Amino acid sequence: MPVAARSLTSLELPAADERVSCHVARHPTVCDFDLITERAAFDALEAEWNGLFDRAGKSHHVFQTFNFCWHWANHYVREPAHGEPRGRAKSGLQLRIVTARRDGRLIMVWPLVCERVRGITQLFWMGGSVSQYGDVLIDAGPDEAVVLRSAFKFIRAQARADILRLRRVRDDANITALMTEIGATAADRQLAPYMDLTTAGDFSAFEQRYASKTRKNRRRLARRLEEKGPMQFLRLHGGDEARELAGKAVALKAKWLQSRGLVSNAIADRRMVGLFADFAEGKTRPVGCVVSALKSNGEIAALEVSFGCKARLAMHMIVFNLAFEKSGAGVLLLEQGLKDGYAEGFDALDMLAPGDDYKFDWCDKSDGVTDWVMPLTLKGELYTRVYLEFLRGRLKRWLKKLPQPLRRLMREGWAKTASPTSE
Protein backbone atom coordinates (compact mmCIF):
# COMPACT_ATOMS: atom_id res chain seq x y z
CA MET A 1 0.00 0.00 0.00
CA PRO A 2 1.43 3.44 -0.87
CA VAL A 3 2.67 5.75 1.86
CA ALA A 4 -0.26 7.81 3.12
CA ALA A 5 -0.91 10.36 5.82
CA ARG A 6 -3.95 8.50 7.12
CA SER A 7 -5.71 5.31 6.28
CA LEU A 8 -8.97 3.75 7.29
CA THR A 9 -8.71 0.01 6.77
CA SER A 10 -11.43 -2.61 6.61
CA LEU A 11 -14.11 0.04 6.54
CA GLU A 12 -17.49 -1.62 6.32
CA LEU A 13 -19.82 0.40 4.14
CA PRO A 14 -23.44 1.17 5.08
CA ALA A 15 -25.91 -1.44 6.26
CA ALA A 16 -27.76 -3.76 3.92
CA ASP A 17 -30.79 -1.50 3.54
CA GLU A 18 -28.51 1.21 2.11
CA ARG A 19 -26.80 -1.07 -0.37
CA VAL A 20 -27.78 -1.41 -3.98
CA SER A 21 -28.27 -5.14 -4.43
CA CYS A 22 -29.04 -8.32 -2.54
CA HIS A 23 -25.68 -9.68 -3.66
CA VAL A 24 -23.86 -6.85 -1.91
CA ALA A 25 -26.06 -7.27 1.15
CA ARG A 26 -25.09 -10.95 1.44
CA HIS A 27 -21.41 -10.15 0.92
CA PRO A 28 -20.64 -6.92 2.82
CA THR A 29 -18.47 -4.53 0.87
CA VAL A 30 -15.18 -3.74 2.57
CA CYS A 31 -12.83 -0.97 1.39
CA ASP A 32 -9.57 0.46 2.57
CA PHE A 33 -9.47 4.25 2.19
CA ASP A 34 -6.22 6.23 2.15
CA LEU A 35 -5.46 9.93 2.16
CA ILE A 36 -2.38 10.57 0.02
CA THR A 37 -0.53 13.72 1.08
CA GLU A 38 3.05 13.04 -0.01
CA ARG A 39 4.44 13.43 -3.51
CA ALA A 40 6.28 10.11 -3.31
CA ALA A 41 3.03 8.32 -2.50
CA PHE A 42 1.29 9.99 -5.46
CA ASP A 43 4.13 9.00 -7.80
CA ALA A 44 3.93 5.42 -6.53
CA LEU A 45 0.31 5.23 -7.72
CA GLU A 46 1.25 5.63 -11.39
CA ALA A 47 0.85 2.04 -12.62
CA GLU A 48 -2.32 1.39 -10.60
CA TRP A 49 -3.85 4.75 -11.54
CA ASN A 50 -3.19 4.05 -15.21
CA GLY A 51 -4.72 0.60 -14.85
CA LEU A 52 -7.85 2.05 -13.26
CA PHE A 53 -8.10 4.64 -16.03
CA ASP A 54 -7.77 1.96 -18.70
CA ARG A 55 -10.66 0.05 -17.08
CA ALA A 56 -12.95 2.87 -15.97
CA GLY A 57 -11.83 6.13 -17.60
CA LYS A 58 -14.11 7.86 -20.09
CA SER A 59 -13.21 10.28 -22.86
CA HIS A 60 -14.07 13.31 -20.69
CA HIS A 61 -11.71 12.08 -17.95
CA VAL A 62 -8.69 13.45 -19.82
CA PHE A 63 -7.98 15.82 -16.91
CA GLN A 64 -8.01 12.92 -14.44
CA THR A 65 -5.25 10.92 -16.14
CA PHE A 66 -2.18 10.29 -14.01
CA ASN A 67 0.04 12.03 -16.57
CA PHE A 68 -2.04 15.22 -16.61
CA CYS A 69 -2.08 15.38 -12.81
CA TRP A 70 1.64 14.56 -12.63
CA HIS A 71 2.61 17.49 -14.87
CA TRP A 72 0.27 19.82 -13.01
CA ALA A 73 1.70 18.79 -9.65
CA ASN A 74 5.23 19.49 -10.91
CA HIS A 75 4.31 23.15 -11.33
CA TYR A 76 1.70 23.82 -8.66
CA VAL A 77 1.94 21.51 -5.64
CA ARG A 78 4.13 22.53 -2.75
CA GLU A 79 5.85 19.86 -0.70
CA PRO A 80 5.57 20.58 3.07
CA ALA A 81 8.71 22.07 4.59
CA HIS A 82 10.87 19.99 6.91
CA GLY A 83 9.13 19.58 10.25
CA GLU A 84 5.82 21.04 9.02
CA PRO A 85 2.76 18.95 9.97
CA ARG A 86 1.52 17.25 6.81
CA GLY A 87 -2.07 17.08 8.01
CA ARG A 88 -2.63 20.83 8.01
CA ALA A 89 -2.75 23.10 4.98
CA LYS A 90 -0.75 26.28 5.22
CA SER A 91 0.34 28.41 2.27
CA GLY A 92 0.47 26.70 -1.09
CA LEU A 93 -1.26 23.68 -2.56
CA GLN A 94 -0.94 20.30 -0.88
CA LEU A 95 -2.05 16.86 -2.01
CA ARG A 96 -5.22 15.33 -0.58
CA ILE A 97 -5.81 12.38 -2.92
CA VAL A 98 -8.34 9.85 -1.62
CA THR A 99 -8.01 6.25 -2.78
CA ALA A 100 -10.13 3.17 -2.17
CA ARG A 101 -8.94 -0.42 -2.38
CA ARG A 102 -10.73 -3.72 -2.25
CA ASP A 103 -8.63 -6.80 -1.55
CA GLY A 104 -5.57 -4.68 -2.30
CA ARG A 105 -6.82 -3.60 -5.75
CA LEU A 106 -7.20 0.13 -6.46
CA ILE A 107 -10.88 0.73 -7.30
CA MET A 108 -11.21 4.51 -6.83
CA VAL A 109 -9.15 7.70 -7.06
CA TRP A 110 -10.63 11.02 -5.93
CA PRO A 111 -7.88 13.46 -7.00
CA LEU A 112 -7.95 16.46 -4.66
CA VAL A 113 -5.61 19.15 -3.35
CA CYS A 114 -6.12 21.71 -0.60
CA GLU A 115 -5.15 25.32 -0.14
CA ARG A 116 -5.79 27.96 2.48
CA VAL A 117 -7.43 30.97 0.81
CA ARG A 118 -8.75 33.99 2.75
CA GLY A 119 -8.52 32.02 6.00
CA ILE A 120 -10.53 29.09 4.64
CA THR A 121 -9.00 25.69 3.90
CA GLN A 122 -10.50 24.61 0.59
CA LEU A 123 -10.44 21.24 -1.15
CA PHE A 124 -10.69 21.21 -4.94
CA TRP A 125 -9.77 19.15 -7.96
CA MET A 126 -6.19 18.27 -8.67
CA GLY A 127 -5.55 20.30 -11.81
CA GLY A 128 -7.20 23.40 -10.34
CA SER A 129 -8.37 25.96 -12.87
CA VAL A 130 -6.33 24.23 -15.60
CA SER A 131 -8.69 21.22 -15.51
CA GLN A 132 -11.87 21.79 -17.44
CA TYR A 133 -13.80 18.75 -16.19
CA GLY A 134 -13.51 17.21 -12.73
CA ASP A 135 -14.54 13.75 -11.62
CA VAL A 136 -13.69 10.67 -9.57
CA LEU A 137 -12.23 7.61 -11.28
CA ILE A 138 -14.01 4.51 -10.02
CA ASP A 139 -14.58 0.96 -11.15
CA ALA A 140 -18.17 0.42 -12.19
CA GLY A 141 -20.12 -1.94 -9.96
CA PRO A 142 -23.37 -2.40 -8.05
CA ASP A 143 -21.97 -0.66 -4.96
CA GLU A 144 -20.33 2.27 -6.74
CA ALA A 145 -22.64 4.80 -5.04
CA VAL A 146 -21.92 3.27 -1.64
CA VAL A 147 -18.16 3.54 -2.14
CA LEU A 148 -18.47 7.20 -3.15
CA ARG A 149 -20.70 7.98 -0.18
CA SER A 150 -18.22 6.40 2.22
CA ALA A 151 -15.32 8.19 0.50
CA PHE A 152 -17.04 11.51 1.19
CA LYS A 153 -17.46 10.59 4.86
CA PHE A 154 -13.76 9.73 4.96
CA ILE A 155 -12.90 13.14 3.44
CA ARG A 156 -15.06 14.98 5.94
CA ALA A 157 -13.39 13.14 8.83
CA GLN A 158 -9.78 13.11 7.67
CA ALA A 159 -8.98 15.95 5.24
CA ARG A 160 -9.16 18.80 7.79
CA ALA A 161 -10.76 21.24 5.38
CA ASP A 162 -13.55 23.79 5.69
CA ILE A 163 -15.10 23.47 2.27
CA LEU A 164 -15.19 21.18 -0.76
CA ARG A 165 -15.31 23.12 -4.07
CA LEU A 166 -15.62 20.97 -7.17
CA ARG A 167 -15.65 23.01 -10.39
CA ARG A 168 -17.04 21.95 -13.77
CA VAL A 169 -18.55 18.62 -12.91
CA ARG A 170 -20.39 17.21 -15.90
CA ASP A 171 -23.98 16.06 -15.55
CA ASP A 172 -22.84 12.56 -16.53
CA ALA A 173 -19.87 12.53 -14.12
CA ASN A 174 -19.47 9.71 -11.61
CA ILE A 175 -19.64 12.21 -8.75
CA THR A 176 -22.80 14.11 -9.80
CA ALA A 177 -25.38 11.90 -8.05
CA LEU A 178 -23.40 12.07 -4.80
CA MET A 179 -23.32 15.87 -4.90
CA THR A 180 -27.11 15.93 -5.11
CA GLU A 181 -27.47 13.30 -2.40
CA ILE A 182 -25.32 15.12 0.18
CA GLY A 183 -27.03 18.45 -0.46
CA ALA A 184 -24.11 20.26 -2.09
CA THR A 185 -24.86 23.70 -3.50
CA ALA A 186 -24.81 24.24 -7.26
CA ALA A 187 -22.80 27.48 -7.25
CA ASP A 188 -22.76 27.86 -11.03
CA ARG A 189 -24.21 26.02 -14.02
CA GLN A 190 -22.89 26.27 -17.57
CA LEU A 191 -22.96 24.48 -20.90
CA ALA A 192 -20.03 22.84 -22.66
CA PRO A 193 -20.73 22.84 -26.43
CA TYR A 194 -19.26 20.15 -28.65
CA MET A 195 -19.25 18.93 -32.26
CA ASP A 196 -20.41 15.33 -32.65
CA LEU A 197 -18.39 14.06 -35.62
CA THR A 198 -20.20 10.72 -35.65
CA THR A 199 -23.27 12.41 -37.14
CA ALA A 200 -21.51 12.73 -40.53
CA GLY A 201 -19.09 10.51 -42.39
CA ASP A 202 -16.54 13.20 -43.24
CA PHE A 203 -15.86 16.92 -43.09
CA SER A 204 -17.67 17.70 -46.34
CA ALA A 205 -20.85 16.05 -45.08
CA PHE A 206 -20.57 17.69 -41.64
CA GLU A 207 -20.04 21.11 -43.21
CA GLN A 208 -23.43 20.97 -44.94
CA ARG A 209 -25.17 21.71 -41.64
CA TYR A 210 -23.81 25.27 -41.78
CA ALA A 211 -25.62 27.87 -43.83
CA SER A 212 -24.32 28.50 -47.35
CA LYS A 213 -23.65 32.10 -46.40
CA THR A 214 -21.48 30.97 -43.46
CA ARG A 215 -19.41 28.66 -45.65
CA LYS A 216 -18.92 31.36 -48.28
CA ASN A 217 -17.83 33.82 -45.61
CA ARG A 218 -15.10 31.44 -44.42
CA ARG A 219 -13.79 31.08 -47.96
CA ARG A 220 -13.79 34.87 -48.31
CA LEU A 221 -11.81 35.20 -45.07
CA ALA A 222 -9.26 32.68 -46.35
CA ARG A 223 -8.80 34.60 -49.62
CA ARG A 224 -8.30 37.90 -47.80
CA LEU A 225 -5.73 36.41 -45.44
CA GLU A 226 -3.87 34.84 -48.35
CA GLU A 227 -3.58 38.29 -49.90
CA LYS A 228 -1.35 39.28 -46.98
CA GLY A 229 1.04 36.42 -47.71
CA PRO A 230 1.27 32.62 -47.69
CA MET A 231 -1.08 30.92 -45.25
CA GLN A 232 0.20 27.85 -43.39
CA PHE A 233 -1.51 25.43 -40.98
CA LEU A 234 0.50 23.40 -38.47
CA ARG A 235 -0.68 20.40 -36.45
CA LEU A 236 1.89 19.34 -33.87
CA HIS A 237 1.80 16.28 -31.60
CA GLY A 238 4.78 17.04 -29.39
CA GLY A 239 8.25 18.43 -29.96
CA ASP A 240 10.20 21.62 -29.41
CA GLU A 241 8.09 23.76 -31.74
CA ALA A 242 4.89 22.61 -30.04
CA ARG A 243 6.44 23.58 -26.70
CA GLU A 244 7.27 27.07 -27.94
CA LEU A 245 3.85 27.64 -29.50
CA ALA A 246 1.98 26.49 -26.39
CA GLY A 247 3.80 29.12 -24.37
CA LYS A 248 2.88 31.73 -26.99
CA ALA A 249 -0.75 30.67 -26.77
CA VAL A 250 -0.85 31.54 -23.07
CA ALA A 251 0.82 34.89 -23.78
CA LEU A 252 -1.67 35.70 -26.55
CA LYS A 253 -4.56 34.82 -24.23
CA ALA A 254 -3.19 37.22 -21.61
CA LYS A 255 -2.94 40.01 -24.19
CA TRP A 256 -6.49 39.38 -25.40
CA LEU A 257 -7.82 39.55 -21.83
CA GLN A 258 -5.92 42.77 -21.20
CA SER A 259 -7.37 44.31 -24.37
CA ARG A 260 -10.87 43.63 -22.99
CA GLY A 261 -10.12 44.95 -19.51
CA LEU A 262 -10.28 41.44 -18.05
CA VAL A 263 -8.01 39.62 -15.62
CA SER A 264 -7.65 35.86 -15.24
CA ASN A 265 -5.73 34.73 -12.17
CA ALA A 266 -4.93 31.42 -13.84
CA ILE A 267 -3.58 32.96 -17.06
CA ALA A 268 -1.65 35.63 -15.16
CA ASP A 269 0.09 32.95 -13.10
CA ARG A 270 3.55 32.39 -14.60
CA ARG A 271 3.35 28.68 -13.85
CA MET A 272 0.73 28.28 -16.58
CA VAL A 273 3.26 28.93 -19.37
CA GLY A 274 5.67 26.29 -18.10
CA LEU A 275 2.90 23.77 -17.58
CA PHE A 276 1.46 24.15 -21.08
CA ALA A 277 4.95 24.00 -22.55
CA ASP A 278 5.55 20.66 -20.81
CA PHE A 279 2.16 19.37 -21.91
CA ALA A 280 2.86 20.30 -25.52
CA GLU A 281 6.41 18.97 -25.69
CA GLY A 282 5.16 15.50 -24.82
CA LYS A 283 8.58 13.98 -24.12
CA THR A 284 7.76 12.77 -20.61
CA ARG A 285 4.40 11.22 -19.65
CA PRO A 286 2.46 12.53 -22.67
CA VAL A 287 -1.07 13.81 -22.16
CA GLY A 288 -2.32 13.71 -25.75
CA CYS A 289 -1.64 17.42 -26.25
CA VAL A 290 -2.16 18.77 -29.77
CA VAL A 291 -0.97 22.25 -30.78
CA SER A 292 -2.48 23.77 -33.91
CA ALA A 293 -1.36 27.00 -35.52
CA LEU A 294 -2.27 29.27 -38.40
CA LYS A 295 0.57 31.36 -39.78
CA SER A 296 0.16 34.25 -42.17
CA ASN A 297 3.27 35.25 -44.06
CA GLY A 298 5.32 33.48 -41.38
CA GLU A 299 3.63 35.25 -38.45
CA ILE A 300 1.43 33.50 -35.89
CA ALA A 301 -2.19 34.48 -36.52
CA ALA A 302 -4.03 31.99 -34.30
CA LEU A 303 -3.24 29.07 -31.96
CA GLU A 304 -5.10 26.21 -30.35
CA VAL A 305 -4.01 23.88 -27.54
CA SER A 306 -6.11 20.73 -27.17
CA PHE A 307 -6.02 17.38 -25.37
CA GLY A 308 -7.09 14.13 -26.98
CA CYS A 309 -8.46 11.20 -24.99
CA LYS A 310 -10.36 8.12 -26.14
CA ALA A 311 -11.66 9.68 -29.40
CA ARG A 312 -12.57 13.03 -27.79
CA LEU A 313 -10.54 16.21 -28.34
CA ALA A 314 -10.89 18.83 -25.60
CA MET A 315 -10.18 22.21 -27.22
CA HIS A 316 -8.72 23.88 -24.16
CA MET A 317 -7.36 27.19 -25.47
CA ILE A 318 -8.20 28.92 -28.76
CA VAL A 319 -6.53 32.32 -29.23
CA PHE A 320 -5.66 34.74 -32.00
CA ASN A 321 -3.03 37.40 -32.47
CA LEU A 322 -4.64 40.81 -31.92
CA ALA A 323 -2.95 42.00 -35.12
CA PHE A 324 -5.20 39.54 -36.98
CA GLU A 325 -8.37 40.23 -35.01
CA LYS A 326 -10.41 41.32 -38.03
CA SER A 327 -9.02 38.70 -40.40
CA GLY A 328 -11.02 35.78 -39.02
CA ALA A 329 -7.85 33.81 -38.20
CA GLY A 330 -9.54 32.06 -35.29
CA VAL A 331 -12.45 30.99 -37.50
CA LEU A 332 -10.12 29.59 -40.14
CA LEU A 333 -8.10 27.66 -37.55
CA LEU A 334 -11.30 26.17 -36.12
CA GLU A 335 -12.40 25.06 -39.56
CA GLN A 336 -9.02 23.40 -40.16
CA GLY A 337 -9.28 21.77 -36.74
CA LEU A 338 -12.60 20.25 -37.76
CA LYS A 339 -10.99 18.78 -40.88
CA ASP A 340 -8.09 17.44 -38.81
CA GLY A 341 -10.52 15.97 -36.28
CA TYR A 342 -12.02 13.79 -38.98
CA ALA A 343 -8.61 12.88 -40.38
CA GLU A 344 -7.38 11.78 -36.93
CA GLY A 345 -10.48 9.73 -36.10
CA PHE A 346 -12.00 11.77 -33.28
CA ASP A 347 -15.67 11.26 -32.46
CA ALA A 348 -16.15 14.64 -30.76
CA LEU A 349 -14.51 18.07 -30.71
CA ASP A 350 -15.32 19.51 -27.29
CA MET A 351 -15.19 23.31 -27.01
CA LEU A 352 -15.72 23.10 -23.23
CA ALA A 353 -17.48 25.54 -20.93
CA PRO A 354 -18.60 28.26 -20.90
CA GLY A 355 -21.19 28.08 -23.66
CA ASP A 356 -20.22 31.29 -25.47
CA ASP A 357 -22.28 32.26 -28.51
CA TYR A 358 -19.42 31.78 -30.96
CA LYS A 359 -19.08 28.15 -29.85
CA PHE A 360 -22.69 27.45 -30.73
CA ASP A 361 -21.96 28.83 -34.20
CA TRP A 362 -19.99 25.58 -34.59
CA CYS A 363 -21.70 23.17 -32.20
CA ASP A 364 -25.24 21.85 -32.08
CA LYS A 365 -24.82 19.74 -28.94
CA SER A 366 -23.73 20.50 -25.38
CA ASP A 367 -23.24 18.93 -21.95
CA GLY A 368 -24.22 20.56 -18.68
CA VAL A 369 -21.50 21.30 -16.12
CA THR A 370 -21.88 22.47 -12.54
CA ASP A 371 -19.65 24.01 -9.90
CA TRP A 372 -20.50 22.23 -6.63
CA VAL A 373 -19.81 23.60 -3.15
CA MET A 374 -20.13 21.60 0.07
CA PRO A 375 -19.24 23.11 3.48
CA LEU A 376 -17.44 20.73 5.82
CA THR A 377 -17.23 22.95 8.93
CA LEU A 378 -19.17 25.85 10.44
CA LYS A 379 -16.55 28.25 9.10
CA GLY A 380 -17.02 26.73 5.65
CA GLU A 381 -20.79 27.07 5.98
CA LEU A 382 -20.48 30.80 6.73
CA TYR A 383 -18.06 31.30 3.82
CA THR A 384 -20.45 29.52 1.47
CA ARG A 385 -23.57 31.38 2.52
CA VAL A 386 -22.10 34.86 2.96
CA TYR A 387 -19.43 35.07 0.27
CA LEU A 388 -20.06 32.43 -2.39
CA GLU A 389 -23.85 32.56 -2.44
CA PHE A 390 -24.47 36.23 -1.58
CA LEU A 391 -21.49 38.52 -2.19
CA ARG A 392 -19.50 36.90 -5.00
CA GLY A 393 -22.11 37.14 -7.75
CA ARG A 394 -23.05 40.69 -6.78
CA LEU A 395 -19.41 41.78 -6.83
CA LYS A 396 -18.96 40.34 -10.33
CA ARG A 397 -22.06 42.10 -11.65
CA TRP A 398 -20.92 45.36 -10.07
CA LEU A 399 -17.46 45.06 -11.63
CA LYS A 400 -18.97 44.61 -15.10
CA LYS A 401 -20.69 48.00 -14.81
CA LEU A 402 -17.46 49.90 -14.10
CA PRO A 403 -15.42 51.69 -16.81
CA GLN A 404 -12.81 49.39 -18.34
CA PRO A 405 -9.67 51.00 -16.79
CA LEU A 406 -11.21 51.01 -13.30
CA ARG A 407 -12.52 47.48 -13.79
CA ARG A 408 -9.04 46.26 -14.70
CA LEU A 409 -7.54 47.99 -11.65
CA MET A 410 -10.14 46.48 -9.32
CA ARG A 411 -9.70 42.99 -10.76
CA GLU A 412 -5.93 43.17 -10.45
CA GLY A 413 -6.24 44.19 -6.81
CA TRP A 414 -8.68 41.36 -6.14
CA ALA A 415 -6.44 38.87 -7.92
CA LYS A 416 -3.70 39.48 -5.36
CA THR A 417 -5.88 37.94 -2.61
CA ALA A 418 -7.39 35.16 -4.72
CA SER A 419 -6.07 31.75 -5.63
CA PRO A 420 -4.96 31.41 -9.28
CA THR A 421 -5.46 27.67 -9.06
CA SER A 422 -8.95 27.24 -7.62
CA GLU A 423 -10.80 30.41 -8.65
Image (cartoon, grey):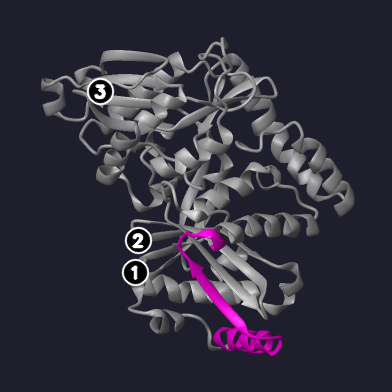
Residue nearest the observer in this picture, 341 or 124: 341
Q: Is residue 15 left or right of residue 23?
A: right
Label 3: element kind: helix
Residue 401 in picture, x, y percent from top left: 83, 50
- Circle 3: is it few (<14), some (14-19), or many (20+) Cα within 10 Å? few
Q: Is residue 65 left or right of residue 233?
A: left
Which residue is identified by label 3?
A: 18
Q: Earlier in the sequence, mark 3 or mark 1?
A: 3
Residue at (68%, 86%) from the top-left corner? 229
Q: Earlier in the sequence, mark 3 or mark 2?
A: 3
Which residue is identified by label 1?
A: 345
Q: Are marks 2 and 1 in contact (CB under 8 Å)?
A: yes
Residue 392 in picture, x, y percent from top left: 70, 36
Residue at (71%, 45%) from the top-left corner? 268
Q: Are marks 3 and 2 in contact (CB under 8 Å)?
A: no
**Does residue 187 appear in this view?**
no
Say which mark, if any, is on residue 311.
Answer: 2
